[in-house]
């Protein structure tokens, strides 16, 4: 079974340019997450989807970041325009719907990430 | 914002030794998870412990949870070079988002 697939793995752009990241979650996983991980830090949640609905986007900088999950499967995260401080690894993860685990926990499966460098 | 803080930030040991890393968090939780991240890769789930559990084992991993102190520890016994990675704790409440700590970078020398 394929895991969570992300592309591109690496992207280098100049500031003020747009960039987009794509994620294909594990088949059957209704919940999809985008995290941002700065160097030497833990991942921080940007947005969480339950199927095609964004249920938590409180940490998404909406002036320049946007995300969509059409048909409740693949997702795209876009930054326009990019700033120097956006350099980070963008991680996509998926899980079964909340409450599917007996503990009520969300166990996440992560993709390999997309490393963005803004010059 | 990050809920948890791991301690130490970095740990270097020899193969065969045990590695212990700690996680402290701020608010009440329902579950605590530990994840591993190899350099340049995504995170991999290792183990989950519920708030009503005190200890859990999985292979060479042992996790403890002390909700009164809001802390957890991850013990890796008989470490191997392949255990070299960053380790993160993550906490959640039911159906809520998973919040990760800052991580411990473990280096195991052959």
Image (cartoon, coloured by chain):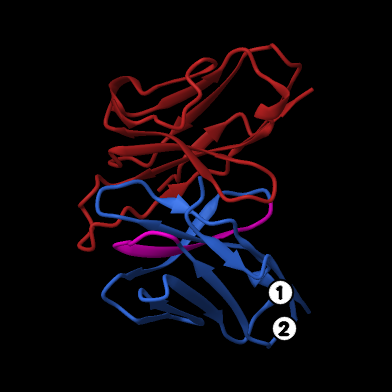
Chain colours: A red, B blue
User: Is residue A103 depicted above or below A39 in this figure?
Assistant: below
Given the image, what chain letter belongs to the residue carrying mark 1? Answer: B
Q: Residue at 53% x, 19% y: name it.
A: A78
Q: Can residue B49 be seen in this view?
A: yes
The location of residue B10, given as percent across then percent down, is: 71, 67
Q: Residue at 30% x, 69% y: name it.
A: B50
- Residue B34 within the magenta-colored segment of the rendering: yes
Given the image, what chain letter belongs to the residue carrying mark 2? Answer: B
Q: Are marks 2 and 1 in contact (CB under 8 Å)?
A: yes
User: Is residue B50 depicted above or below B20 in this figure?
Assistant: above
Q: Earlier in the sequence, mark 2 or mark 1?
A: 2
Q: Same subunit under labels 2 and 1? A: yes
- The magenta span reads B26-39
The location of residue A116, given as percent across then percent down, is: 68, 30
Instruction: Give the numbered dot on residue A14.
Output: none
Q: Name the residue under label 2.
A: B15
- Residue B107 within the magenta-colored segment of the rendering: no
């Amino acid at each position: 079974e394929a895991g969570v697939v992300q592309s591109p793995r690496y992207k280098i752009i100049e500031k003020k340019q747009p960039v987009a990241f794509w994620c294909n979650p594990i088949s059957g996983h209704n919940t999809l997450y985008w995290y941002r991980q700065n160097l030497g830090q833990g991942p921080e949640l940007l947005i969480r989807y339950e199927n095609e609905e964004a249920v938590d986007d409180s940490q998404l900088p909406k002036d320049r970041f946007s995300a969509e999950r059409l048909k409740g499967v693949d997702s795209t995260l876009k930054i326009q325009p990019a700033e120097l401080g956006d350099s980070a690894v963008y991680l996509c993860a998926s899980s079964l719907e909340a409450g599917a685990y007996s503990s009520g926990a969300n166990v996440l499966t992560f993709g390999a990430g997309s490393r963005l460098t803004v010059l | 914002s990050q809920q948890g803080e791991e301690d130490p930030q970095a740990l270097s040991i020899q193969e065969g030794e045990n590695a212990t890393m700690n996680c402290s968090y701020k608010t009440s939780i329902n579950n605590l998870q530990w994840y591993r991240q190899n350099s340049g890769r995504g995170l991999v789930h290792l183990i989950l412990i519920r708030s009503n559990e005190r200890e859990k084992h999985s292979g060479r991993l042992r996790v403890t949870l002390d909700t009164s102190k809001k802390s957890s520890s991850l013990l890796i016994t008989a470490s191997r070079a392949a255990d070299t990675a960053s380790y993160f704790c993550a906490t959640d409440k039911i159906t809520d988002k998973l919040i990760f700590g800052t991580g411990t970078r473990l280096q195991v020398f052959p």
